[in-house]
Image (spheres, rainbow, N blue to C red):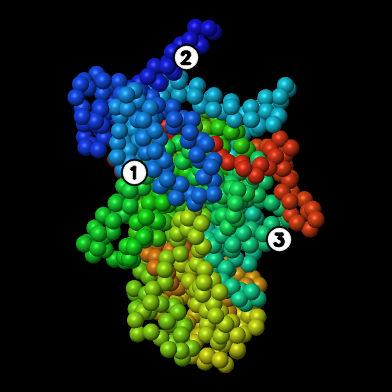
Amino acid sequence: MARGRWRTAGGALVRVVLVWAASALTMLALAGILPDFRLRSGDGEGDSITQAGLTAAWGAGAFGLLSALVWPVLVRALLLVPALVLGLLVFFLNGSLLLLALSLTPAGHGGAAPETAVVVAAAMSAVASATSTALAVRDDEAYRRRLYRLADRRRRRRPGAGARGAKEAAPGLVFLQLDGVGYEVLRQACADLLMPTVAKWLDGSHRITSWRTDWSSQTGASQLGILHGSTFDVPAFRWYEKDTGEVVVCNRPTSAAELQRRAVARTGDGGLLTLDGASRGNLFSGGADQLALVLSVSARRGRANRSRAGYFAYFSDPANAVRTALSFVAEAGREVVQSLRARLRGDRPRVARGGLYPLIRAFATVVERDVVVAAVIGDMLAGRAAVYADLVAYDEVAHHSGPRGRDTDQVLERLDRSIALIARVAEHAPRDYRIVLLSDHGQSPGETFLARYGLTLKDLVRAGCGLPVSRRAGRTHSGAEARAAVLAALHRPVEEGEEAHPRPGSEPVVLASGNLGLVSFPDVPGRASREQIERAHPALLATLADHPGVGFLLVDGVVLGPGGARARLDVPGEAEELLAPFGPGAAEAVRRTDAFPHVADIMVNSAYDPATGAVHAFEEQIGSHGGLGGEQGHPFLMWPAELSEPGAGLVGAEAVHGVLRRWLREADGPQVPVGLRLGRPEIARRPREPLREDSRPEAAPHGILPSAEAPAPDETR
């Protein structure tokens, strides 16, 4: 036993010395390359290479010690700083620590210009992290011991953990949502070996099925249904509510909070993650105590806002910031190159990908991925019972590059590596974990409505109403979810102003949700009838229904199609016949939406070509979702074989919620419903997991983060 402890201590000492030596050599090399960085006295006379080496060793040791001691204090002091600003501050603070370390060298031999210190500190952090990672990976026993120590430390922090006679923890569940990845896309990616980890699971340990979304095939409705068990009155990604005069947008923090409140009030239940759960990178909390990057709570201000806790836990290690920043720059550059290549080849369909989009894409595919994966790893090492995390990378890229192609193939490859990483860490967690993969919707390809017909849906509606239309067609911005996540991280509002609060008047409010359009008349109380619309705007319905880019309309319980086709939803079989081209269940989905209190006066679904699977998005997206037609309505659910079968013919996110609930009961007994106290729903919690205001996920250990682990050339270590 004593010999084993000495061997462990000796191995740890060797690793520390090697990392120290690598940092010192890096400092020496940079001193020879950078003119404003020196490790000798000012005139350099009398200083030997040995003296410079000793100065480098001293400076590297002081820098490492300061980083270990000072960084946790600095990060806690910066909790109110916007998350992305913190990511930039990391470099400047890191440089300041290096300058302080150099000032501590004997005889003041070290020195650097402030801007040079930032570069040197970043390089040293990256080299130290890479060296530590390589040593840990090569020494499997040391790597396992480190994970076990982390898990044991987290276990001891939990009340009641390790008590005498305590039962072995039941298996936990990790739900990984691959945002926007359709059933057929996943199967093809596995067949092409783009996702070898997932393909291996499908060949042995896991089973897969597709499920069908509601008419509103988008993250807001699907994730609300999956996490909170209700998609009622969510007709689209964005819609106008006449009773408040506001536009509800699923990825606006205030709207997400209100939708979550409505769902909890309707179901009387806090959500899927009420008991010892964690919600990471989602629109909604699912009732979890442990939150990071959750949009429904990001509108809060102050220390009570835990939605961005994952950023701070992640950036508390400066090496994480260096790795992620370098990968961020590489991803932004990759997007610029891919966009330019698409333009030079004359690819069609194509949308504009300039402006800030390369940065938004890099945030979704690098920053958010790294932080979410790190948070999930921390949750598993802490032994939490249920974790739900959303990885949005594919959805963001597919909106602008299309659901299939080289761009999205690369994203799927990196997602597979993240899944493999999480699976490896699960082997060292304090409890067994079952990993469930699922998606919230798919994506359908197609040229945008504007590109195909030269006008937007809003222009077409205004023309049908006899209102003036601009000679220059305007653009409808892409409503991808990553944009909201970036703005939330910066403490910036999302879609505020006139778009959130349309001016009162007789002009229609026209909104787009993928290939689903919504037209509302603010001056008509309640839902407008077909007679009211035709009396006020005689040509509008015919203009819309007969347009070649429109598939069908829903107006007050009646479906209108091209050429005067008409079907009442309350007459059996009529809607089924008219909507047959849109696939099984289309009529039932439209019928359900027709009963929502906030359904628009006119719901417009774009045309759909069953032969090609193409739709026409009313937004600037060549891969879209939100309405009926094609793969957008067919996401997947993939589960370990140990769990019970979900059943055939899953329809709607509420049904998926029921399946996930059942799997949680199978693992850890019945779930406790919400209790009503003082008229407000309060989530029932286990006594051993009290709510903590400053609760934050633990940062994952060095060497197991996506940017460091992935060996592919597009990731920078």
Foreground residue among 217 and 25: 25
What is the number of callouts on the image? 3
Residue 652, can we see it?
A: no
Foreground residue among 705 and 597: 705
In the rendered structure, which disc, 2 or 1, sits on the residue that comes first in sequence? 2
Badge 3 marks a residue whose secondary structure is: helix
What is the x, y in percent for residue 620?
Answer: 39, 68
Badge 1 marks a residue whose secondary structure is: helix
- Report the amino acid beneath label 1: Leu
Instruction: Identify the residue under disc 1.
Output: 326
Gap in angstroms between the C-alphas marked 2 and 3:
57 Å
Residue in the picture at 79% in, 58% down: 679
Instruction: Identify the residue under disc 3.
Output: 266
Residue 9 shows which numbered tag?
A: 2
Place residue 37 in its image quadrant.
top left
- Report the amino acid beneath label 3: Arg
